[in-house]
Amino acid sequence: MCRCRVKAFFSYFLIALVLLQTFSREVLVVDFALNRAALAARFCVNKARPQLHCDGKCYFAKRLKQQEERESKAPNALREKLEMLPLAWGPLAPPAPVCWAGAPLSYGPGRPAWAPAGAGRGVFHPPQAPRA
């Protein structure tokens, strides 16, 4: 198997994982719609009371609530994991900033050398108040 096929497979796999995580609620809805009868027969809490017409909606509501709880906990868990990263990165450390010893930077005059000293005074002036 050539290297490009491995890269392509790996990239498609990562894209699929990101899409599944992004559309997790939609996946739950599609799963419920496709397997409604089986889920109602297997997990419904109101099987004894058919007049409620639950048809597995109670189980679906529980699953959605669990999914929302997982999503709300995820940012906090990620922040905690990032805070636990070591400060010494070892070989993966970013390079140290380069400092050159030399003359301090000077920005020179506020105008280019080829422009005369009074250039622009006739064009740039503050607006005047309207006359009554």
Image (tube, grey):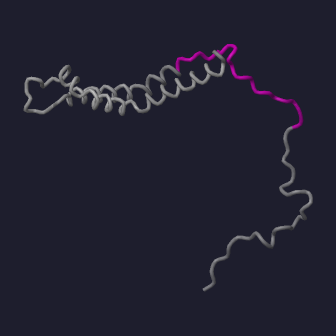
Instruction: Kindly identify the residue that appears in the image at 64 percent across and 77 percent down.
Output: 129
Left or right of 15: which side holds 36?
A: left
- In the displayed structure, 85 sits above or below 73; it is above
Q: Residue 21: x and y, percent?
A: 43, 28
Q: Residue 70: x and y, percent?
A: 36, 25
Location of residue 59 by image quarter = top left
Q: Residue furthest right?
A: 114
Q: Residue furthest top?
A: 90
Q: Residue 44: x and y, percent?
A: 17, 24
- Residues 108 and 22: in front is 22
Instruction: Kindly identify the residue that appears in the image at 49 percent across and 27 percent down.
Output: 16
Q: Residue 132: x and y, percent?
A: 60, 86
- Residues 50 and 83: in front is 50
- Residues 104 and 94: in front is 94
Q: Is residue 53 magenta?
A: no
Q: Which residues are magenta?
A: 83-103
Left or right of 68: which side holds 129?
A: right
Secondary structure mainly formed by the magenta segment: loop
